[in-house]
Every structure is written in structure tokens, then in C-alpha cells.
Image (tube, rainbow, N blue to C red):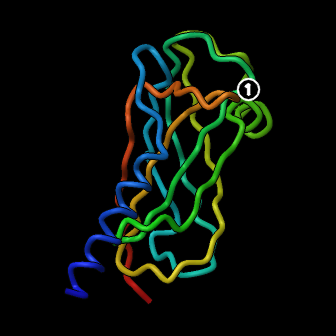
Amino acid sequence: MKFLSTLAIISLAASAATALHCKPVEDGVKFHIIHYNPPEFTSDQQIDVTYYGSVLRPIDRDVFLRTYFYDKNKQRIHRGSVNLCAVIEKYHQGECPLDPEDGFKITVGHKFTTTAEDYIFVETEVIDDEGNCLSDSEDRVEMAWPSS
């Protein structure tokens, strides 16, 4: 009986975690994680994630790229959020607002402590300052490295 209770708690936590994400919209922001570093990630280090994307409709300054990190049990271990235009302008010589078909490639550093082993799932979304979804598609990546 205790096993079933534990299973139910894990299941509820997993469904609650995924409920935090926005539902993709048509003609929004297409983006993909194309690289993460370091592959030999250990606890309490920074992980740099590179995103590549394009815009299918005009995007203003108050747009945020939100990244969620989960352990293998689907428990959220970190959530990072950055202003997409601020990062593009400050570190990547781009300009905002973004116009349709503008592309971008940014790298964002996330620092957090985890005891996760083997892999971490990463999900991303783009939202405006009111929490409305601007993502054209869901992007989910499994990051794997040797456990330490």
C-alpha cells in the first residue's frame, strides 16, 4: 500500500510540474536547445545552454525565455528566466524588437545545485510579461552525463 501512495505522489508531482508550462501557439517563437555545456555536469556548477530560434511574429521587449530543469523522477530542480531581448542585445549584438523571420542564437548560464544522477530533462518556453505563451513549439531535451 505504501508503494502505491508513493507512486501516486510522484505521478501528481509530475503532472503538476508539466502544468506550469504554456500551451504552444501558432506563429510564435520557434526555438531549440542546440548545445549545453559541460557534458560532465556535476552538482553545484553552472550549465550553459545555447538556444537557437526564429520569430514568426513581432516580439517586443517584455518577452521571457523560461527554462525548467527536472531530474529523472520529473521533479523540478531549477527554473531559469531571462528577458530574451535583453540577452540578445547585451551579449549577442542583436536588436529588439524582433521582427518576423529574425533569428537569434543565445547562450544562457544556469547555476544550481542538484543531486540528480545520469540525466536531467530540460524544457523551455517563451512567455510575455503577462504570462501568455509565445512559444511556437515545445522543446524538451534530455541532458546526459556520467554521474559523479
**Taking 77 as reference, is 4 above or below it?**
below
* Residue farthest toward the right in the current orientation of the protein: 90
Relative to 3, 59 lies left or right? right
Q: Nearer the viewer, residue 8 or 104?
A: 8
- Residue at (35% x, 55% y) in the render: 15
Badge 1 crowding class, 10 Å Cα cut-off, few under 14, some 14 to 19, many 20 or more, is: some
Q: Nearer the viewer, residue 62 or 4?
A: 4
Q: Quadrant of residue 66?
A: top right
* Residue farthest toward the front in the current orientation of the protein: 1
- Residue at (56% x, 81% y) in the render: 43
Find residue 93 and report its horizontal and vertical position in percent: 75, 30
**Taking 91 as reference, is 112 above or below it?**
below
Numbered circles on residues, count: 1
Q: Quadrant of the C terminus?
A: bottom left
- Residue at (67% x, 34% y) in the render: 84
**Disc 1 element:** loop
Q: Quadrant of the N terminus?
A: bottom left
Relative to 57, 73 lies left or right? left
Relative to 52, 26 lies left or right? left
Find residue 33 and report its horizontal and vertical position in percent: 45, 45
Find residue 21 and report its horizontal and vertical position in percent: 47, 42
**Amino acid on which the number 1 mark rests in the picture:** Asp
- Residue at (52% x, 28% y) in the render: 133
**Taking 28 as reference, is 3 above or below it?**
below
Residue at mark 1? 62
